[in-house]
Amino acid sequence: MRSHLVPGLAGTTPLARSCGRLKGLAPSPWIALLVALASAIASGTAAARAAGARFEKDIQAFVAADTARPPVRGGILFVGSSVFREWTNVAAAMAPLPASSRAFGGSRTGDQIDRFDQVVLPHAPRVVVYYCGSNDIKAGDDPAEIFARFRAFSDRLRRELPRAQLLYVSATRSPDRIPMWGRVDHYNALVRAHCIATPGHRFIDINPALVDGDGKPRGDFYRDDKLHFHPHAYDAFADVIRPVVRAAWAEASLDEARPGTAGSPPAIATTGTSNPGLLEVERHVAHGFATNNGVRIHYAHMGSGPLVVMIHGFPDCWLSWRHQMPALARTHEAVAIDQRGYNLSDQPRGAEAYDMARLVEDVAAVIRSRGRERAVVVGHDWGGAVAWSFAMARPAMTERLVVVNLPHPRGLRRELTRNPEQQRHSAYARRFQEPGSHAALTPEGLAAWVKEPWARARYVEAFQRSSTEAMMAFYQRNYPREPYTEDSSPPVPVQCPVLQFHGLDDPYLLAAGLDRTWELVARPLTLVTLPGAGHWAHHDAHDIVTRSLVDWLHP
């Protein structure tokens, strides 16, 4: 029997119980990464110690200055290499906030670790602004090695000064290092993901302020060496960095004023009731990037075992699967992607960049980036459309298919053609297909569907990093347009087992679209309908969805 109708399963497994057992998971992939790179960190810091003598003059000058005039503790400290050392008016640029610099030219990330006691601790800064890594890249170091040393600095800061905010300023794409830009971008991407996932950390991308209208480095900013900057270029630095420093200063000040926080790391700003589940997931995931024809796709991953790739819909991001990832990670490697245009993934311009075929290839790139040939593919909403399309276009790469609240594309087209109710419920999609529709979207409005205030704040941040034009391009390139017609081409049956969930209170995609799905699937189809759940059924009924998914993967 190939089709089973399950009208709402009984029994639940509370996520709180699942999260409480996270300590039973396999070690975090971040730990594995750091263990694998331990020799690289050691060699990097050893090399820094060997070269440290050439910085001794700079360090002794810092010590002498701090002895003659003891630094004001709890201020803003700029650390790093020559890009910051040559910013001679940084204190004036950050005024009236108390800022100072202890950057030393030619330094590498290992030097920042080795000189931590002499450079950072005497100031006990409330905010640290960090620029370092370009010299490591020039020396030929792998971006993962450089990131591991930055991570060691981050860990040391959180251990020694748990209330301090850490702001990372991106390594620059300087004209003298064009062949190295790919490694610069890789390093920046690793740090960016870490900053997003780590409380009290912020990523500042300085590169957009350093290019002209054609996206090329501004020649008037750079000195003859095409690496270092003329003084007026630092006005652009200040315009980008100053607002973030002020925000970090305000958050750090609020944290110090909050009772009972001594010795604890800065908390993520939230409103309303806090919930440790989301933060628990964020603490356990690692981050990575796959590349599809030059477009980088970000993903979060945790656990080990057979691969499960999860794809979010609109408007959403990888956090969509926060309820399912901990349970899956007990027996699988759970990977949740940011679709192109969203959050930490690239946002190519032009609606054609969001054609379904390209979205499908993004998923294939993620699977390959994990060293796999196949995966269980899970999708919701637009992620469900991508998942259906992937299973049909890439059957050899699809182990199993799971779809949440997205009828088979043929079923949706049928209902749009025949069913006036589905036509009425799809009015939003027709609005999204209109030119300029993105202008009405705001991060706060896009995040309004998220019920928990503590999670909604994280979504607002993700949508601030996203492209609303890209979001609308999904509809403009892939959603059926009026006049609606049914798909008359020969069907391509899905060749793997399928698990389909549908919240029956979905106001956008009606359950009628599920009819006859079994005719389009050549293997067993399990359909789980969820009364009382809406469009985001994997949130509204997350206990049932998670339990059913885990059970289905272990028949």
Image: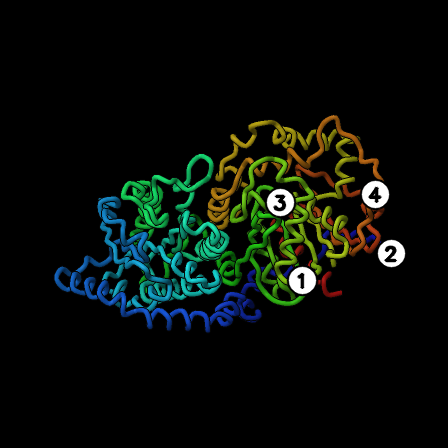
**Mark toward the start of the polypeptide (1 vs 3):** 3
Task: Name the amino acid, label 2.
Answer: Met
For the residues marked 3 and 2, what is the alpha-carbon distance in whole angstroms? 31 Å
Category of crowding for the residue at label 3, using alpha-carbon neighbours closer than 10 angstroms: few (below 14), some (14–19), many (at least 20): many
Say the numbered circle drawn on residue 491. Answer: 4
Task: Name the amino acid, label 3.
Answer: Gly
Label 2 sits on residue: 1
Number of marks: 4
Horizontal and vertical percent position of residue 512: 77, 39
SS assignment at label 1: loop
Horizontal and vertical percent position of residue 422: 72, 33
What colouring method underlies this structural image? rainbow
Q: Is residue 472 above or below residue 393?
A: above
Task: Name the amino acid, label 1.
Answer: Arg
Horizontal and vertical percent position of residue 193: 48, 55
Say the numbered circle drawn on residue 313. Answer: 3
Name of the residue lying farthest toward the front: 224
Name of the residue lying farthest toward the right: 1
**Mark toward the start of the polypeptide (4 vs 1):** 1
For the residues marked 1 and 3, what is the alpha-carbon distance in whole angstroms? 24 Å
Instruction: State which mark lies toward you, 1 or 3.
Output: 1
Q: Is residue 483 above or below residue 531?
A: above
Q: Residue at x 65, y 45 (%)?
A: 359
**Mark toward the start of the polypeptide (3 vs 2):** 2
**Mark toward the start of the polypeptide (1 vs 2):** 2
For the residues marked 1 and 2, what is the alpha-carbon distance in whole angstroms? 31 Å
Say the numbered circle drawn on residue 372. Answer: 1
